Image: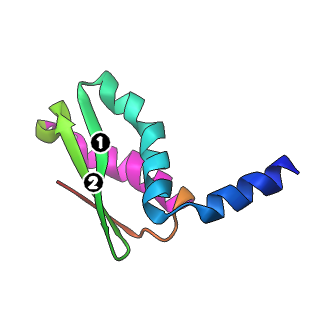
C-alpha cells in the first residue's frame, strides 16, 4: 500500500520537482567540494543546471555531469534527455 502511495505522489510531481529531488541527492557530494548545483530552468527535454562555488571553475565539472548527474536524471526523470550547465 505504501509503495502504491509513493508511486502516486511521484506521478503528481512536476518535472521541476522531480529534477530538484534528484539534485538534492547529488548536492551533498558537490557541497563537500565547495560547490553547489540548482535547477535554473527546464527547456523542452533539457534541464538547465547552475553550478556555483568551486564547481563553476572546476575542470572536473564535465566528468561530474557525465558520470553522476546525467545517469541519475536519466534513471529517475526519463523525460529529461539533455543536461546543459551554466
Q: Is residue 32 above or below residue 78?
A: above
Q: Which residue is mark 2?
A: 49
Provide the secondary structure element on which disc 2 rests. Answer: strand
Which range is magenta?
A: 58-75
Question: Picture quarter containing residue 61?
Answer: top left
Q: Which residue is mark 1?
A: 37
Question: Picture quarter containing residue 11?
Answer: bottom right
- Image location (x, y in percent) of residue 1: 88, 51
Magenta segment main secondary structure: helix
Q: Is residue 30 left or right of residue 18?
A: left
Seen at 55% across and 58% down, the residue is 75
Q: Say whether marks 1 and 2 touch (CB < 8 Å).
A: yes
- Image location (x, y in percent) of residue 40: 26, 55
Q: Nearer the viewer, residue 36 or 74?
A: 36
Residue 24 image label = none
For marks 1 and 2, the one nearer the N-term is 1
Q: Residue furthest right?
A: 1
* Neighbourhood count class around disc 2 (C-alpha, 10 Å): few under 14, some 14–19, many 20 upward: many
60 falls in the magenta region = yes
Q: Is residue 80 above or below residue 72?
A: below
Q: Residue furthest bottom?
A: 44
Seen at 34% across and 52% down, the residue is 66
52 falls in the magenta region = no
- Image location (x, y in percent) of residue 85: 22, 55
Q: Quadrant of the C terminus?
A: bottom left
Seen at 50% across and 63% down, the residue is 14
Q: Is residue 18 left or right of residue 58?
A: right
Seen at 17% across and 32% down, the residue is 53
Question: Picture quarter containing residue 19?
Answer: bottom left
Amino acid at each position: 500500500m505504501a509503495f502504491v502511495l509513493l508511486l502516486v505522489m511521484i506521478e503528481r510531481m512536476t518535472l521541476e520537482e522531480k529534477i530538484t529531488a534528484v539534485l538534492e541527492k547529488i548536492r551533498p557530494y558537490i557541497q563537500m567540494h565547495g560547490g553547489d548545483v540548482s535547477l535554473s530552468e527546464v527547456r523542452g527535454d533539457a534541464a538547465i543546471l547552475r553550478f556555483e562555488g568551486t564547481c563553476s571553475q572546476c575542470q572536473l565539472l564535465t566528468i561530474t555531469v557525465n558520470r553522476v548527474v546525467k545517469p541519475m536524471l536519466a534513471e529517475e526523470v526519463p523525460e529529461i534527455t539533455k543536461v546543459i550547465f551554466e
